[in-house]
Image: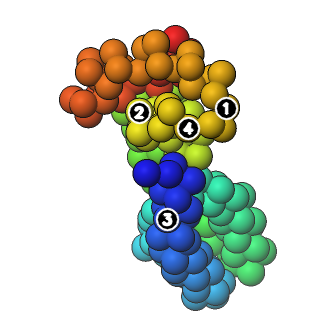
Amino acid sequence: FVQKNLAFEFFILSEHAARCFYLIFVSLMLLGLRTVSTWLAVALAFAALFNILIKPSALSLIPVALIFFFITWLFNRARTGKVVTNALVFLILIFAPLMGYMQTFDKRIGGFTLSYFGGYNFFAHVGHFTNLDSQPHAEIKKELKAFFPLYVEKYASRGRYRPNWLIHN
C-alpha cells in the first residue's frame, strides 16, 4: 500500500466530476444572462455546491456567481429586487449546507475546514498503513513504531480516525 497512489486515484476520480459541474455551472450562467429566475439561482447554487464538495478549490465559483448576478442586474435594472433576491438565494443555498458540512466535519475529525483530504486528515485515514520497516525517513518511523500499534488497536481498526491523536501525539 502506498498513500501517494491513493491520493492520485482520488484526484483522477474527482477531476471528471468537477469538470462536469464546472460546465453545468457555466452553461447555467449563459442560459441565465437574459432571464431573471429563482430556479436558475437554485440550479447555480447546487452546481457550485456539488463542485465545492468535490473540489474545495471551486470556492472561486462563489465570486464568479456574484459577478454573474451583477452582470444580470446591468441587463435587467428594472428587476433589481429579483436579481438581489436571486443572489441571496444563491448565497443561502451555498453557505447553509457548507456550514453544516463543516460543523459535522469538525465534530467527526476535529478541524473546522472544508477539506483536509490532501493534508493531515488524509494521513490520519491511511497513515496506519505506513510501512514502518522501510528505509525512507527511518528516524521518523522509529518514533512512530512506539504508538502506531496502540492507535491501530484503539482507533483505526474501529473506523474512528483521530488525526489530532495520530499527528500530534
Nearer the observer, disc 1 or disc 2? 1
Crowding at dot 2, Cα within 10 Å, few <14 / some 14-19 / many 20+, comes out as some
Q: Mark 3 = which residue?
A: 9
Which percent across, then down, holds residue 52?
54, 57
First of labels 3, 2 by sequence position: 3
Residue shown at the point (65%, 56%) measured from the top left: 57
Separation of residues labelled 3 and 4 (CA atoms): 23 Å
Residue shown at the point (57%, 25%) measured from the top left: 141
Separation of residues labelled 2 and 4 (CA atoms): 14 Å
The reply to whether callout 1 and callout 4 are in contact (CB within 8 Å) is: no
Nearer the observer, disc 2 or disc 4? 4
Q: Mark 4 = which residue?
A: 134
Q: Mark 2 = which residue?
A: 128
Question: In the image shown, does 18 or 158 lie closer to the viewer?
Answer: 158
Say what amino acid the circle numbered 1 marks. Answer: His
Say what amino acid the circle numbered 3 marks. Answer: Glu
Q: Relative to 13, is 162 above or below? A: above
First of labels 1, 2 by sequence position: 2
Residue shown at the point (57%, 77%) measured from the top left: 19
Nearer the observer, disc 3 or disc 1? 1
The reply to whether callout 3 and callout 2 are in contact (CB within 8 Å) is: no
Separation of residues labelled 3 and 1 (CA atoms): 24 Å
The reply to whether callout 1 and callout 2 are in contact (CB within 8 Å) is: no
Separation of residues labelled 3 and 2 (CA atoms): 19 Å
Q: How is the image coloured?
A: rainbow
Determine whether the residue tagged by mark 2 lies in a helix, strand or loop: helix
Which percent across, then down, holds residue 50?
46, 62
Which percent across, then down, holds residue 127?
47, 35
> Which residue is at the far left?
158
